[in-house]
Image (tube, rainbow, N blue to C red):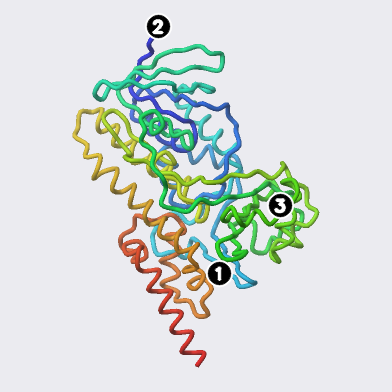
């Protein structure tokens, strides 16, 4: 059987794979991407964060995205029982990007993949990895295309950016349960004829529907808006009928969505996803590194998925370049630790959201402007900025702040 030889094999052509491949290619390496799906393909994770812009810029992909006229995103808004907490990215603690995009991922991911291909990276679509054999850092990967033809690709290193496909963790038994509770979503894209242009469409809105259940509202530049309910599986059991009927009943049950989306047309029948949180035993090994959702996927709230995917790929790609130059790489210190730093900060905020801790902070009567800027930086994806106390002390700072707010408001009421 014929064996093709490349410097680096990247598994997956999504944002994680494209960013890694583009950076590797810019360094002069021969890179090949194998992708199981045919692009464009549907996927959620439609609201980006400013921090991912640095990774996209490093990969040379910003201009390609700009040309597509995706909806610019300048902040994030949280709503509960009519109360509003609005964050604007230009008012954040960390110096960095102050905007990003809200995108239909099918178009966004295809844009990244096409731009990467134009850099000289060949992409084999509809190609499935069936086996990987490592010999030290070198590897031989067996793949099968849509017609059933099999071939082998020899590589000096593998970057697994396969997302939910989780190729290497599944092949080598590295998967482990997530620490987060299993949750479910029902969502669709809606023809948004009643969109307010005053405070939208340049931000994502997260609506607290009831304890443990929330709604995302993500306007696109096309006039469509992505809307989804997220909660524990038991929440969805109270709604009867087909997906269309159940989703319309949910929209009717929430004052913030009731009038805006009543009788609006869905671009597709509402879809369900559940139990998406996942983790893995290790993020690297001899001859490979895992990036993006292959390492760990948390939750849709705070839109951390694409940011963790692109930033981890950015870091991994530069370390692979260093490795292939013959330099020493401390994968634990240079990759595992910073990647887990980002994951752990976001995890603290995800847990604080579902526990109600962030409700007390977001909807407090007299928010502290400096603290709001620090939290805004986290919401912008700057979860590696140790000068921010709400990053450095992410596991305790939110709870302390919530208790302080609760006591202060109680005293003021008395």
The alpha-carbon separation of the residues under discs 3 and 2 comes to 51 Å
Residue visible at 51% across and 45% down?
Answer: 276
In front of the other: 314 or 257: 257
- Circle 1 sits in a helix, a strand or a loop, which is it? strand
Q: Residues within 10 Å of mark 2 (few under 14, many from 20)?
A: few
The mark lying in front, picked from 2 and 1, is 2
The residue indicated by pointer 2 is 1
The mark lying in front, picked from 3 and 2, is 3
The alpha-carbon separation of the residues under discs 2 and 1 comes to 60 Å
Q: Position of residue 383 (x, y in %)?
A: 38, 56
Q: Position of residue 210 (x, y in %)?
A: 60, 65
Q: Quadrant of residue 95?
A: bottom left
Depicted 332 relative to depicted 160: above or below: below
- Circle 2 sits in a helix, a strand or a loop, which is it? loop
Q: Name the quarter where the N terminus is drawn.
A: top left
Depicted 316 relative to depicted 194: above or below: above
Residue visible at 70% across and 61% down?
Answer: 257
Q: Quadrant of residue 194?
A: bottom right
The residue indicated by pointer 3 is 247
The residue indicated by pointer 1 is 85
Q: In the rendered structure, are the residues bearing label 3 and label 2 in contact, judged by CB atoms less than 8 Å apart?
A: no
Q: Position of residue 206 (x, y in %)?
A: 58, 60
Q: Quadrant of residue 174?
A: top left
- Circle 3 sits in a helix, a strand or a loop, which is it? helix
């Amino acid at each position: 059987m014929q064996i093709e030889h490349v410097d680096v094999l990247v598994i997956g052509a999504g944002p994680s794979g494209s960013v890694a491949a583009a950076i590797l290619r810019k360094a002069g390496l021969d890179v090949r991407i194998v992708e199981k799906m045919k692009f464009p393909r549907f996927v959620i994770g439609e609201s980006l964060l400013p921090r991912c812009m640095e990774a996209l810029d490093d990969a040379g992909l910003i201009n390609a995205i700009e040309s597509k006229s995706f909806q610019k995103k300048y902040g994030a808004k949280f709503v509960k029982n009519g109360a509003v907490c609005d964050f604007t990215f230009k008012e954040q603690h960390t110096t960095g990007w102050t905007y990003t995009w809200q995108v239909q991922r099918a178009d966004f991911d295809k844009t990244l993949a096409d731009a990467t291909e134009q850099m000289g990276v060949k992409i084999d679509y509809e190609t499935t990895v069936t086996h990987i054999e490592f010999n030290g850092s070198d590897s031989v990967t067996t793949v099968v295309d849509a017609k059933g033809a099999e071939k082998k690709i020899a590589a000096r290193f593998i970057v697994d950016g396969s997302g939910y496909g989780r190729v290497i963790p599944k092949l080598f038994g590295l998967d482990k349960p997530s620490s987060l509770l299993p949750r479910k979503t029902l969502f669709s894209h809606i023809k948004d004829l009643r969109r307010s242009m005053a405070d939208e469409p340049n931000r994502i809105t997260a609506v607290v529907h009831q304890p443990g259940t929330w709604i995302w509202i993500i306007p696109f530049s096309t006039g469509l808006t992505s809307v989804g309910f997220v909660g524990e599986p038991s929440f969805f059991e109270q709604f009867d009928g087909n997906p269309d009927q159940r989703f319309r009943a949910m929209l009717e049950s929430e004052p913030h969505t009731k009038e805006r989306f009543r009788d609006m047309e869905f671009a597709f029948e509402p879809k369900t996803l559940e139990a998406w949180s996942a983790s893995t035993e290790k993020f690297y090994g001899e001859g490979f590194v895992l990036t993006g959702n292959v390492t760990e996927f948390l939750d849709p709230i705070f839109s951390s998925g694409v940011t963790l995917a692109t930033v981890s790929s950015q870091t991994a790609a530069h370390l692979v370049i260093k490795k292939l130059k013959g330099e020493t790489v401390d994968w634990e210190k240079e990759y595992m630790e910073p990647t887990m730093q980002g994951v752990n900060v976001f995890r603290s905020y995800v847990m604080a959201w579902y526990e109600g801790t962030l409700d007390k902070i977001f909807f407090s009567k007299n928010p502290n402007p400096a603290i709001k800027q620090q939290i805004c930086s986290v919401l912008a994806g700057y979860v590696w900025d140790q000068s921010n106390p709400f990053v450095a002390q992410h596991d305790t700072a939110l709870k302390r702040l919530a208790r302080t707010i609760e006591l202060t408001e109680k005293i003021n009421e008395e």
